[in-house]
Image: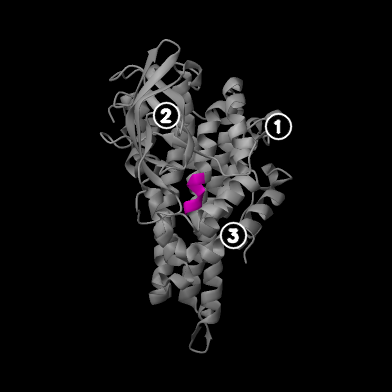
Amino acid sequence: MTAAKDFTWPEEFIPPFADLIISIVRDWADKEVMPLRRRIDEDWEDGRLYLPPLKKLLGEYGMQRFLFPEDLGGMGMGGSNYLSLLAFMVFEEIARADSGMDPPLGMVFVPLLFIAAEPHVNRRLLEEFAPMFCATKEATYAALGMTEPQGGADIENVGLIGGSTITTTAVREGDEWVINGHKLWPANSGGLARLIAVVCTTDPGSSDPSDIAVIYVPGDAPGVTQGNVYEKGGMASCRNGDIWFENVRVPLWYRAHGPGEDARCFAEALALMNMGSIAYATGAMMNIHERLLEFTGSRMYRGRPLKENDAVAGVLADFTANIEALRILGYHSARMCDRPDLYGPRWSPQLVAKTRAHRYFAADRCSEAIGRVMNLMEACGVDRDWDVEKHWRDSSILHFMFGGKQLCQVEVARWFYGCETI
């Protein structure tokens, strides 16, 4: 088994308690996920296999309390200077077993980041939602309602479109918001989400980002309908579906912050999700490295282990070089998100563009590297007993998450080349 520190590890800015966190999550992954991961793809709808491990990680181990202040029963990491780094480490260890289990945890973090992370903390909402997450050992799931049927991920293109394609509306009536709309693909939908951060508009058709609102809706509120789970080509342990909102009423103070600030939170989520998805890739690749050690050490060619042949060693070296490069990129991306004093706020166009570049570069390199490994392993590459084909399918989803590659390219070109009409 390969330890995380066998690859490049940014010693100079990793907190002293990182080893403890990694050991806890790795032990969980080895005992709770590894023994069943080859059967998870057939469990996509019911969750009999993958929901119990997630319950242990979120509820019993308390990962769902990560961002809440300590005086509310949380771990107090919302104000930590290591928030993104710690998230990266945790996501990487989870992806080593099953990257499909990363979005369920990530989408507990992201909606709560809007109100728990400096500099925009909403103490009143933290107090409102803390019992839901901190006073139980049952798993509590949150979701981010973002993508919509009419334009897919167009609403993520805030730099050009400014929220003008958002059709989920929030209308103020007295001391309440009335929400109507339809969201696609939120992780932790399909009946799991107990709290939904809904990206909506207070002025349909407006391209002014100040009209973008992030409003919290309980998953069981009257008028909320969570649809069936989608069957996907990978990441079966991440439940995605439709969520409909029909005249859903919540208090006015369930809005994350207000005009302008909500749009910044949305942009911040994009930067953090870009960063986190790199860990999905590197974690999977580290496990493939472990499987390659076994495969190339036990298979013989011309009287020697497969790994002792020059051509094979070259493929192995290239695969490891990709892990090294992507981990360095991912950890630096996380560090940039943690140090606004050096790199600017997480919602800034430059940081969003840079993390977009990091993410799609990592997804491309991951797919190419795993493809070469599968070619090396020939028929064993697609054999479930070696686990590589599962990582290959799961990591392919990275190309389509959070707006997909084309939107990443657009935002990179917009920032670095001054493109104004895309």
The secondary structure type at the circle numbered 2 is strand
Q: Residue furthest bottom?
A: 303
In the rendered view, tell whether residue 387 sits above or below residue 263: below
Q: Earlier in the sequence, mark 3 or mark 2?
A: 3
Q: Nearer the viewer, residue 185 or 134?
A: 134
Pointer 3 local density, CA inside 10 Å: few below 14, some 14–19, many at least 20: some
Splitting the image into 4 quarters, where does residue 3 fall?
A: bottom right
- Say if the magenta span includes residue 101: yes
Outermost right residue: 16
Q: Earlier in the sequence, mark 2 or mark 1?
A: 1
Q: Are marks 3 and 1 in contact (CB under 8 Å)?
A: no
Q: Which mark is residue 198?
A: 2
Q: Residues within 10 Å of mark 2 (few under 14, many from 20)?
A: many
What x and y, as percent, mark residue 50?
50, 55
Q: Which residue is mark 1?
A: 70
Q: Is residue 339 visible?
A: no
Give the structural element (helix, strand or loop) at label 3: helix
14 falls in the magenta region: no
The quarter in which the C terminus is drawn is: top left
Q: Which mark is residue 32?
A: 3
Residue interval drawn in magenta: 100-104
